[in-house]
Each structure stands twice: as C-alpha cells, then as structure tokens.
Image: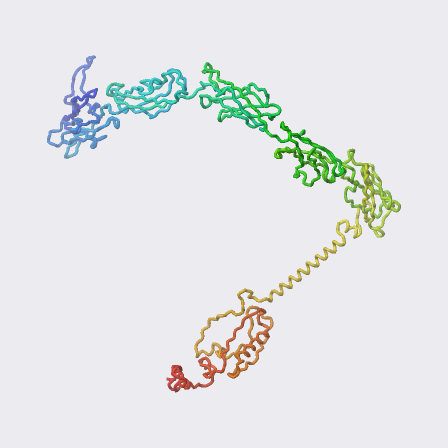
Amino acid sequence: MDGRRVCLLMVLWAMTHLGSPGLGLRALRRTTGGRRAGLTGQDANGVPLRRSKRGWMWNQFFLLEEYTGTDMQYVGKLHSDSDRGDGSVKYVLTGEGAGSLFKIDEKSGDIHATKRLDREEKAYYILHAKAVNRFTNEALEGESEFIIKIHDINDNEPRFTKDPYMARVPEMSDIGTSVIQVTATDADDATYGNSAKVVYSILEGQPYFSVDPETGLIKTALPGMDREVKENYQVVIQAKDMAGQMGGLSGTTTVSITLSDVNDNPPRFTKTLYEFRVPESNEVGSAVEVIRAMDADIGQNAEMDYRIIGSDGPGMFDITTNRSTQDGVIVLRKPLDFERKRQYSLRVQVENSHINPRFYSMGPFRDEATIKIVVEDVDEPPVFERASYVMEVKEDAARNTVIGSVSASDPDNKSSPVRYSIDRLTDMDHVFNIHPDNGSVFILRDLDREENAWHNISVTAYELNNAQQISRVPVYIRVLDVNDNAPTFATNYETFVCENAKANQRIQTISATDPDEPLVGHRFFFSLAQEAAGKANFSVRDNKDNTAGILTRRNSYSSLQKSVYHVPVVISDGEFPMQSSTNTLTIRVCTCDREGNMKLCNAEALTARAGLSTGALVAILLCVIILLMIVVLFAALRRQRKKEPLIISKEDVRDNVVSYNDEGGGEEDTQAFDIGTLRNPEAIEESKQRRDIVPETFYPPVRRPVLPPTRDNNGDVRDFINQRLQDNDSDPTAPPYDSLATYAYEGNGSVAESLSSLESVTTEGDQDYNYLSEWGPRFKKLADMYGGDDSDRDS
C-alpha cells in the first residue's frame, strides 16, 4: 500500500523429531511491491531466475502436547513492517481455538497456548492471522492461513478390543492349531515414532499356548491336551507399545479357552456280569431292568447304542437306548413262566453312535457284558384252556339243561383247586348258571331265539385258597331256532272289490311272514278256512312262491246288500312241527269306474279306511262341546270381575282418612259449608255413595229418627249405636267385607249446654252470656269476653 513494502514476521518455536526440546527461528517475508524484483541467480540451464510476486507461505509448525509448565506455552510471534512501535498496529488471530486455546497480544503479536493440548483429541489446528490499523480498522496485510500441529508423545497405553475373550479349540489338537486372534489399539500417532507400535506377549498360559508378537494370534503349544483331564484354561496376553522397548506402555486381557470334546473315549460297562430278578407276572412290553455304560465324552460323542448279540431265550427280551440318559432298557417281549423256564442269559454289546476316524487307533469303541435274568415265582390266577368259548342250545331246551362247560387250572406248582362263577353284570336276567366245581354251564330260564339269538356272558375262575386270584373268559351262547311261531300276514291289507267285478277276478295278492329262520328258507301254504269254504264269496289261490291271490267267485256285488266281507285265510309253514294260523282279510264293496278304479265306498267303509271309529267321532264331538262350555264360563267370569271393587289392596280396611286440605274462613264464613252438621248428628247427607266402585243403582238411604237422650236414660248411647248399626246393615252401598265404624256421641244433658261458638251460626237471635259471671273465677275470662252490654261489645 502506497508502494510501501510491508513485511509480516512470525517467529515460531519448534521441537526436534525425537521429542527433545529445541528452538528454531524461522522468518517468512512477503514482498508486496516490485521495487526489489530482479535477477537473483541462474538455474542449471543458465536461465536467469527472477523473484516473483507471491503471498505468504506458512509451513507446518509443531507444538508439544501435554505441556506441564506453569506459564502459558509460547507458540510464536506476528510482526508487520508497518508496525513502528507506536501502537497503531493491531494483530488479529482467528480460526480453530483462537481466543480460547490460542491467544495473541494485539500489540506485540506474541501467540501463546492457554491450555494443555491432547493430540488424541485434536491433531492440528487451522488459524488465520492479519494486521489491521487499530484506529481505522483497515487491513494492513491480507489474511494468511497457517497450521499448528500438535506433536505426539507416548501418553496412551494399548487397549484390547475385548476383555475377556472367549475361545474354543478341540481337544487333542496338533501344535500350532489356531485358537483366536486378539487385537489391541494405541491412540498415539502411528506415523510418528514407535508410540503406537504394539507387540504382543503371553504372561500366563504357558506352556499350553503361544501368541504371535505381531498379529496377536494365539495357537496351541502343547500336543495331546485332554479335555477329560483339564477342560478350561485362562491365558493372559500383554500388548506393549514402543515396539516392546523399555519404557513403553502396556495393556493386558484375559482369554478363556475351553477344550471342546471329541470322541476319543470308548464306552465301558461298569461290570462284566449283571444279574437281575424278575417276577413272572411282568407284563409283555414292560421294562425289566436298566443297564448303563460309562463314556468320558460328552454330548454327541457320548451317544451309544445297545444290542443283544446272544441269548438262550430268543425273542424273549429286547434292549433299547434311552437317548436322554444313554441307558440300556431291557424290555420283555414274551410272557415269563416260572414253571417253564426259570433263568435266562443275555450277551449285550454297547457301541458309540458317532465314531471319529481320527481316533480309530484308540479303539475299539465298543464293550460287551453278560446279563443273567432270574425268573421269580408268583401266585398266578387260573388259566383257561381256551381264550373264549362258543356254545349252542335250542330255544326249546328245558331248564337245567347243560349246554357246555369251561375248564381252567392253576399254573403254579401248588396247583390250587379252581372254582367257577358267572359275572352277573353280563347275565343280569339270570338266564344261565355254572357249576362251581366242574364248570358246566346250564339254563335257568326259558329261551326265545326270536327275542335274543345270542347271549354273551363272562365266566370267572378263582383259586380256592386265594380268591383274589381271578381270571375271566368270554362265553358266547347261540340260541338255535325251533319252529315255534306260526306265519301271519306280512302287512295289514286294505282290500276292496268293485260292485261290477267279474268272477275269478284277482282283487288282492297277499304274502306272509314268520319270525322263525329255517335252514332251507321259508315255504308258506295259503288256503281258505274250512268253515267258509261252502258259502264263500271269494277264493284263495296259492301261487307256490310264498304268495297267494284273492279271487272273486261271482260277477257282481252290492254294497247295499252287504258292504264288508271277512275272508278267513289259513297260512301254514312247511317246517316240523308245522305251525299255522288263520288270518282275516277284510274286503269292502265299493263303486268303481269301468277301469276298476274305486270311486265311492259307504260311510262305514270310509270311516274304517280313515282309521276313525264311531267311538272316536263321539269323543271328538264331546271334546268340542267341553271347549265351548269353557269359553262361555270364562266370558261369564270376566263380566263378573268387572263389578268387583276398584280398591283391592290389603291395606283397604274401610277406615281410611280422607284429607281435603280445606281451610275455613272462621265464624263469619257461613257460605263454605253447613257447620251445624258437625255439631248435630241428625244433620247428614241425603245420600252417600261408595267411591271405590262405579254405582249401578242409586238407593235412597234409610234413616231413622234419633231419639234425643236424657240424663235419666243411660241407654241413649246404646240406642244411638244400635240405630247406626241397623243403618249400615240395611245400606246396599256398604262394603261386602268387615269394616270398623267408630261413633263419638257427646250427649245433650250438660247443665252448661254447649260452650262452642260454632253453634252460634244456627242460633236465631242474640244469646245472654251474663250467667258466665256466676260460675266462679274459672269462667271469668269467658265472662269478660262474652258478657257485658251490647254497647260495650260494639265499641
């Protein structure tokens, strides 16, 4: 500015490369004018070099981190050629940390760090510097940028990414088998010195494992490590910076290494001979005993299979493996019988299910043992010779006839006698019985095959010496058929004959049924009864196929002469002994058209066809009449119910108090009502009607004159009450139930007569009350109120 050259000088303190403190002074000058531009030298080719116009160039400056001095750490100094020392130049510092971490002296341009700096928090700071006129605030130099880089020191130890590490490696692994790789990081600057160069070493876990110092890979260092001997290992790994040199910082971590199992151990029986005792009563399919082979391996490597490789009782036993416990379960496959065989010998083998070929040389992975099974004698129930019995008996067999027998015996050596009985739950009608000693089954009641063709009963056998030992056997009894039922019509036939029928015309085909079941099938014979053969109007023709036809024997029939014919038909079977029955066929005479279709039958026939007899029609008519009577009675009751009192409450006792809430106007109110009625019993209403029902007829009340009572007659009250009683008894509007009527009669015999002022309403003329003063001091107040001259009262 104004052609003047302004120089900005900055002095910085820096450190040496190895961190030892050293101070260096570096001055940077900027030329803003061209007065001194000129030839300064030549290059290798002899080309003259000229000084070119350029801005400020700032290098990267270092500041020591974690400064521990008491004074602020000096960074450098800003200076402008325009600064004459008169205080007119002001130095301004802006950018990252300006004013807080870094402060500048506005007058001298000295820069200081106010706090301890940590490179791991921030590695460098970018700042801007300029010089301005203090008074005009005009820039004397353009803004320039420079960087302050924090110089790293070894102040962070290596840290592992996990703590602890968990790892697994198979047992019996070869030397050098990789287990796990650990990693540690150092927050120091890896580009400067060895502060972040980490080296790994093993502190605990030798001689079983080793670690690669550069990669941190842990490997096995000892062969033949057996899980069954030791399963878990704790390995401590150290990571040290400064490439492991003296003075470096270090960190540690723990690695938990577990040896995983491999199938390197065969199963082994704990004994070579097992002996078990088994009762002969054990059921087929039940577990006899359990054996177990031991295997030091675990999980899948300990799974094993059992099998029988030899036995003196083939098929008697089997062995299965319980997968949850790896036990061998011996199962009974056939019934045991102490009396037949008392001892069995088995040869059992166990073998691993999953064998590792790598360890074949450590085999064989199987073992064998002998099992001796001793059968124990048990008191067994009787055994029947058969699993079930089938017996046959004819339905006409007599009672106590033996139809068969059952047989059972005690299988035990003592051979206890056996007794028999029938389970009555299977023969509740007591149709059969059994001889308790020999087991003969015989009949107690008559049989009927048509009612029950099969009887299924249960026979029990028990030992005489031990009734608790019971066995059962089903007995099926078939009842054989005997021709003891006569054939009958197969259905209820409804037959009619037309009045214009011709002779030998078939009007009906009949068939028969028989509940008996002959072996060769049924054969029925049909004929007309002998008693009707001479004067028969119809004939029966046997069709030889268990059916027969009903034929007419004349040309015409008249319903007026006879409307119904009864034809007796004899049906017999061909069995022995032969059974026959006479069945009546009812034939109605009807009017038909030319094609023989029925048009009309008489009323009796129609009624019979509809299934309604005369008695049924009469019963229906009676029911209708009864219903009509019920309806009429109901209507009459409804009309009677309308006349009943409106008040039917239980609380209605006919002495209710009716309140009208009327207030009188005093003595002078003579228009409201006749007050004399309250005083004179004779003053009553001409008629009094009930308010709880609607009156139908108005009856004038009957009132008798009331005799005034006298002092000499003590019966005045009795006469008054009797008169009121007669009035109520003769009153047609009185309630039809008991009611309570209360009467209070004051009487007319008082010497002082009535003292009430109410009577003055009906009294003609003025009364003289002067006599009140003669009654004594008790009536003095009344004498003052009513006594005296008229002139006094008016005034």
Q: Residue 245: where, in percent of width, then height? A: 25, 18
Q: Residue 546: where, in percent of width, then height? A: 80, 38
Q: Residue furthest top?
A: 45
* Vertical placement of residue 16 versus 380, above or below: above
Q: Residue 413: where, in percent of width, then height? A: 63, 27
Residue 42 in sight from this viewpoint: yes
Residue 111 in sight from this viewpoint: no
Instruction: Work out whether residue 14 or residue 299 is closer to the camera in this orientation and state it.
Output: 299
In terms of image quadrants, where is residue 452? top right
Q: How is the image coloured?
A: rainbow
Identify which residue is drawn at 12% across, 32% down: 87
Instruction: Work out whether residue 168 or residue 217 is closer to the camera in this orientation and state it.
Output: 168
Instruction: Work out whether residue 518 or residue 679 is closer to the camera in this orientation and state it.
Output: 518
Q: Residue 238: where, in percent of width, then height? A: 30, 21
| 71 horizontally vs 590: left or right | left
Q: Which quadrant would the C terminus be assigned to in this image?
A: bottom left
In terms of image quadrants, where is residue 512? top right
Q: Which quadrant would the N terminus be assigned to in this image?
A: top left
Instruction: Work out whether residue 343 or residue 689 is closer to the camera in this orientation and state it.
Output: 343
